[in-house]
Image (tube, rainbow, N blue to C red):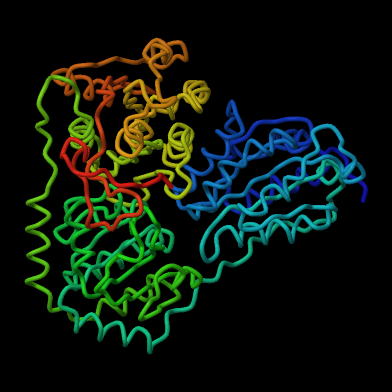
Amino acid sequence: MNTPANSQPRTGARWLTQALEAEGVDTLFGYPGGTIMPFYDALVDSKLRHILVRHEQGAALAANGYARASGKVGVCVATSGPGASNLVTGIADAMLDSVPMICLTGQVGTPAMGTDAFQELDVFGITMPIIKHSFLVRKVDDLPEVVREAFRIAREGRPGPVLIDLPKDVQVADAWHLPPHRPDTVELPPSPSDAGLAEAVAAIAAAEKPVIYGGGGIALADAVDTFRAFVETTKIPTVLSLRGLGALPTGHPQLLGMLGMHGTRAANMAVQECDLLIVIGARFDDRATGKLAEFAPFARVIHLDADAYEISKLRTANIALPGDVAAGLRTLSAASSNCGNWTRRCAANRDKCAPRYDAPGKDIYAPALLKRLCEVADDDAIITSDVGQHQMWVAQHCRFSHPRNHLTSGALGTMGFGLPAAMGAQVACPDRQVILVCGDGGFMMNVQEMVTIARCQLPIKIVLLDNSTLGMVRQWQELFFAERYSEIDLSDNPDFTALAQVFGIPAKHVQARADIDDALADLLARPGPAMLHVTIDARANVWPLVPPNFANSTMLESNPAKQKTEAPNAIPA
């Protein structure tokens, strides 16, 4: 079809930008290159905001953080070959943590595919194990169906990333004949069966020691309010997974804390003793269960989840409730629970085992610092963390009012996640306070995105905990490898304060706990991006700790060798 006079050519790329706008996309994170140039040319005339990152991994993780904070679909863009392959870690992270994303990649023209052309790479095949669905668009006429399906798949059921691979000739092809894009409807999962819900209500009424185990699926199902109503109606003691933190606000009377490897003693002991485990949107992850065969050994299991494949995958459910989590919780809220004595006992144990923050000495104690940070931060602040010891300290000691306020790489444990995820969260929520807590190891993995933060003047507040070591690896080598330390020394780190200032971001360095209050106040009061570089003890460990392949009742509070007990014979998983 001929192009109308006085108008830009309506290419496949231009049609795609209009389709993205129709899907409600407002921001893309990406990096241009040869085969994706037609799409970038079309962006010039679109309403879409594009954030130019400095590495494609930063684009994928920023889109990831945008989606986690907003609940909307995140979008990242890269060219073919190394551009596409650099997205892989961020795609895998989104897949394993159920984050809705669309990944747009350029591809060599269809006639050149399979010829080992310059920057040709089979990204469709590379990402197949780590993506919810992939599309290779072979002709421009396929674009409407592909885009409609891609967004529906990314959002529907258990969310996840979807790849659209775009050959260059498809992007430049004439698209005047294509209809305007209309988003597809997203169907909610059906409600759990009436019979199953009735059985669950009866089981709750009969239980003497019930425990609720909530996970990341609560927020994914937009069921936070119904989950809270269920807990508050039944008054059942509740534990949360790492991704479930915030489903109950920190300090809630029924909340015993996080369970698992670095969970609270009160949470782990309650689960080990309970006679009914009510699992809501959780998946029995190994870091939550410890030795699975000895997890909640006396409990019958009710399992409510939108993803039917998670039910009885690792632990057989006595009462299986696949379907709409919010709908299921509304019915379960009618259950009467007679566990007042048990609830009081669990609460007393929580109070007895509460962490202390009066560590001796003048050095900065990371848990106390993070507790204080949350006391002076906004109530609805979004906290992103990287991966390592500080990630667990954040989970243990920070305050969260909603799961979308705690952005962390759960299943994949991606070092380098925190900085770009904070960028995505700040773009998604420009009026919210976004705080990044990271370690010196993870910070350096995507440090180039400090340029992006400075250029976009994203008012992210960075708290960099610097122990000059790979802290979690060092801790495991201390405990489980007879203190045979191998390749964990980061004492040649740069001067992080000076480095931030080179990027154009003001920074301050603190080493004494007496300076913390003033330093945090100064950090949070600054109008733009800022960093607080905090020196902490390289020998500090995260406690408590359940050794790998041990039951959650086996919790260490310090090095077993120092307790004069035999160290567990465990190999890190």
Residue drawn 42% across the image and 64% down it: 221
Q: Is residue 190 above or below residue 512?
A: below
- Identify the image quadrant of residue 60: top right
Residue 528: percent from left, percent from top: 38, 23
Foreground: 393 or 180? 393
Residue drawn 52% across the image and 46% down it: 93
Residue 393 seen: yes
Q: Is residue 79 above or below residue 229?
A: above
- Identify the image quadrant of residue 83: top right
Foreground: 493 or 502? 493
Residue drawn 87% across the image and 42% down it: 109
Q: Is residue 185 left or right of residue 424?
A: right
Residue 434 seen: no
Q: Is residue 166 left or right of residue 186?
A: right
Residue 90: percent from left, percent from top: 56, 42
Foreground: 415 or 329? 415
Total marks shown come to 0
Report the residue that reaches farthest toward the bottom.
Answer: 195
Residue 475: percent from left, percent from top: 32, 34
Residue 320: percent from left, percent from top: 40, 79
Q: Is residue 143 left or right of residue 263?
A: right
